[in-house]
Image (cartoon, rainbow, N blue to C red):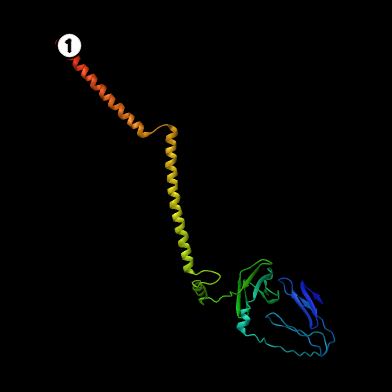
Amino acid sequence: MQVADLDFEVNETGFRAISAGNDPANITLEIDDLPGQVLSMSGLPDEDFIILLEDSGAKRLASSYEMSSVEVNQTREELKEFRVKVVDANLGKIELFDHLTGDSIATRYSSGVAEFEVDNFRFELAGFGDDGDFFDVSVNRSRAGDGRNMEVMIDLATRTPDRPNFQDDFRAIALAVGSQLESGRLIEKSAISLRDAAMATEDELSGVNLDEEAGKLLEQQQAYKAAAQILQTAREMFDALVNIM
């Protein structure tokens, strides 16, 4: 028996091989002189199963298969994931793998376009790639156009133990905005009061009072006018004395 990189289990009912990577489990099994023996296999990938009988002598083989009892819709709900991989770029060899088990589902030789069909899904790979290039393909688990998103949005309008509804959210937002606005107004008033107090303190420390200085200027202006009147009167008296002489 030749085994690749895989997990190999032997139990009472037989053995099981599971690929440990993205490559399929490659097992070569040789059976000699086992007439009447039964070889049972399950969990096979969605691909053709080919049996070859070699060597000379009488060849007799009986087989049977059972269809899965799971409905097609339920099977598709499992939503397998696939990997399309370029195995040999020179030959154009491309393989389709089951991403979970690593089983090879199909092999194509591409001259620019390769097509696969599995589980009623069709894959088309156009172009050329390098060795080891791959694409992981998964099926969308939602159904487009079923209105599921709208139903979830409508459910948000209902209060639950885990979260409030839209009205509660709106009231909370309005209260938060109003509180921030009123807090901003109070901060503004406080800042204005602090500014006025700072300006008054600055005036006191500098020794300059604008009202007081304005009053002093008025006093000096009145004194200047009085002095001018005295000078005018003295000039007139001097002129009168000169004229008399």
Q: How many marks?
A: 1
- Which quarter of the figure has residue 121? bottom right
> Residue tagged by mark 1?
242
With respect to residue 55, does 190 lie above or below? above
Q: Where is residue 113 in the image (x, y as percent from the top left)?
A: 61, 73
Residue at 38% from the left image edge and 33% from the top image edge = 209
Residue 119 at x, y = what percent? 63, 80
In this picture, residue 25 sits left or right of residue 189: right
Question: In percent of the image, x 30 and y 30: which residue is there?
Answer: 218
Image quadrant holding the C terminus, namely top left
Determine whether, in the image, residue 7 is placed left or right of residue 160.
Answer: right
Which of the two residues, 88 or 44, is positioned nearer the viewer here?
44
Kindly state the secondary structure of the residue where label 1 is placed.
helix
**Nearer to me, 214 or 170:** 214
Picture coordinates of residue 75, whole percent (x, y):
63, 81
Front residue of 1/8: it is 8
